[in-house]
Image (spheres, grey):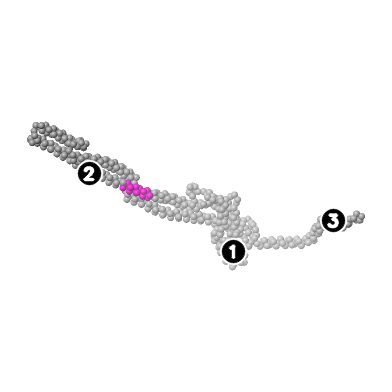
Amino acid sequence: MGHLTNRPHGHGRGPTQPPPPQEAPQEVSGIDFRFLLSALLKYKWLIAAIAVVITVGVAFWSLKLPKVYEATVSLEFDPNPPRPLARDVDDVSSPVSNFFMTQEWMATQQKVLQSRRVCDTVVRRLGLHRDPGFFDVPADARRGWRGVSVEAAAVTLQGRITVTPIKDTRIVEVSVRDSNPDRATLLANAIADAYIEKTKQDRMGSTVSALEWLSTQLDGLKRELGNAELALHDFKRDHNVLSLSLEDRLNITARGMERFSDSLTEARTRRIGLDARLRSLREANRADPMQVHSSVINSNAVVATQRAAYREATAERQSLALQYGPSHPRMRAVDTKIATIRDQMRHEIDTLLDGADLDLREVRRVEGGLQSALDGENEDALRLNLAEIDYNRLNRERENKSKLYGLLLERTAETNLTRMLQIESVRVLDRALKPGGPIMTLSLTS
C-alpha cells in the first residue's frame, strides 16, 4: 500500500498516479462480519433475554385482550319462487322477478341487511342495548352500567356486520363478529331472521295496501254498476223496451213508414185524377151537354142513353116540322120531350159533378190522414233514434263497469290468495354455527 514506482527523470514525466478511485470505497464500506459475530457471541445471553421478555409481554398483552369470534349465515335469493296459482297470477307486491339479477337490486339488499331497521329489530329482540357483554364492559364496571339507547346499540351492531355476495351465485354470506362465540352465532341468525321478517312485512304491507285499495275500488264500482243497471232498467221501462227491443221497434216503425208512404202515394195519385175529373165535369156543366166530349161524360151509361133519346127526339121533331107548324100539339109535345131530356142530362152531369167533388174531398181527407200518420211515424223514428243513442250509452256504460268490476274482482281474489300463500324470494340456506375459535384478539369497541 502506498508504494511508488521510480521512473527515469530523463523522460520528462512526473511521479506515478494514485490507484483508481473505485478501489477506495471497498476499504471504506466493507463490513467486518467477524467483528459482528464476535459481538453476538459476546452478548448472546442478553439478546436472548430481551427476546424472551418481548415475547412474554406480547403474549401476556394478547391474552388480556378480548377474543373476537365470527359467525356466518348464508342467504339464498330465488328469482323464480314456486307459484301454486300458476304464472298467470302475478304478485302485486313483488317486482323482484323483473330485475332480480341487476346489481342495483343486489346492492340494495346488502344495504338492507346492514340497515339500522334490521339492527333495531335484533337489538330490541335480544335486549342488546342492556347487555354489558355485548359492549365488552369490564366486570368491575358492570354494576353501575345502565345500558345505552337502542339506536346506539343498533349502530354498534351495524359496525360488526359484514355482507359478502358470492360471485356468480344468488347466495349472500352475512358475518357477525362478537367477543362471545355463542352471541356471535345468535346475532348472525337473528339478523337473517330479522331481514326475512322485514321482507315479509314489506311484502305483506304492500299486498294488504293493494288489497285495501282494490276492495275500496271494488265497493265503489259495485255501487256504480248497480246504478248503471237501474238506469238501464228505468230507461227500458219508460220507453217500453221490456217486451220489444229498440231495434225491433225501429224495424216496425220503418215498415209502417213504408206502408204509409205507399198509401200516401196512391192517395195523391187518386186525388190528381179526381181533380182532373172534377175540372172536366165543371167545364161540361157550363156547355151544351150534347156538345161535351169529356171522357167522364161519354163513359157514363145514363148520359149515353139520354143522348140517344135526345137525338131520337130531335130527329122526330125534324120530321114533324115538315108536316106541322111550331104550334101544333105534336110539335109542342116533341119540344117538351127534348127539353126534358136535356134537363135530365144536365141533372145527370150535376150528379156526376157532385160525386166527383165528394170523391175528391174524401181522397184529400185520406191523403191528409196518411200524411199525418207518416209524419207521426217519422217523429217516432226520430224519438227511437234518440232513445237508441241513450240506450246504447247506458248499455255501454253498464257493460264497461261490468267488465271493470269483473277484472277488479278477479284481481282482488288473486291478491288475497297471494297474501295467504306468502311466497318468499329469500330464505336461509345455512344457519350460522358456533365458531370453532377466535379470528383475532382486538377490542371490538376500540
Q: Say what amino acid the circle numbered 1 marks.
A: Pro
Q: For the residue labelled by badge 1, is the local secondary structure a helix, a strand or a loop?
A: helix
Q: Residue at x 32, y 50 (%)?
A: 238
- x%, y% of residue 194? 54, 57
Residue 274 versus residue 410 in the image, above or below: above
Q: Give the range drawn in magenta.
A: 379-395
Which quadrant: the C terminus? Answer: bottom right
Q: Is residue 80 magenta?
A: no
Q: Which of 271 and 385 is in front in this view?
A: 271
Q: For the residue labelled by badge 3, is the local secondary structure a helix, a strand or a loop?
A: loop
Q: Which image quarter: residue 44?
A: bottom right
Q: Say what amino acid the circle numbered 3 marks.
A: Pro
Tag count: 3
Mark 3 crowd level (few <14, some 14–19, many ≥20, 10 Å Cα):
few
Q: Mark 3 points at which residue?
A: 19
Distance of label 1 from label 3 (alpha carbons): 78 Å
User: Mark number for residue 132?
Assistant: 1
Residue 218 versus residue 43 in the image, above or below: above
Q: For the residue labelled by badge 2, is the local secondary structure a helix, a strand or a loop?
A: helix
Answer with left or right where residue 371 lies relative to residue 348. Answer: right
User: Mark number for residue 361?
Assistant: 2
- x%, y% of residue 398? 39, 50
- x%, y% of residue 101? 56, 50
Between disc 3 and disc 2, whose residue precedes? 3
User: Mark number for residue 37?
Assistant: none
Q: Do the residues labelled 1 and 3 touch (CB within 8 Å)?
A: no
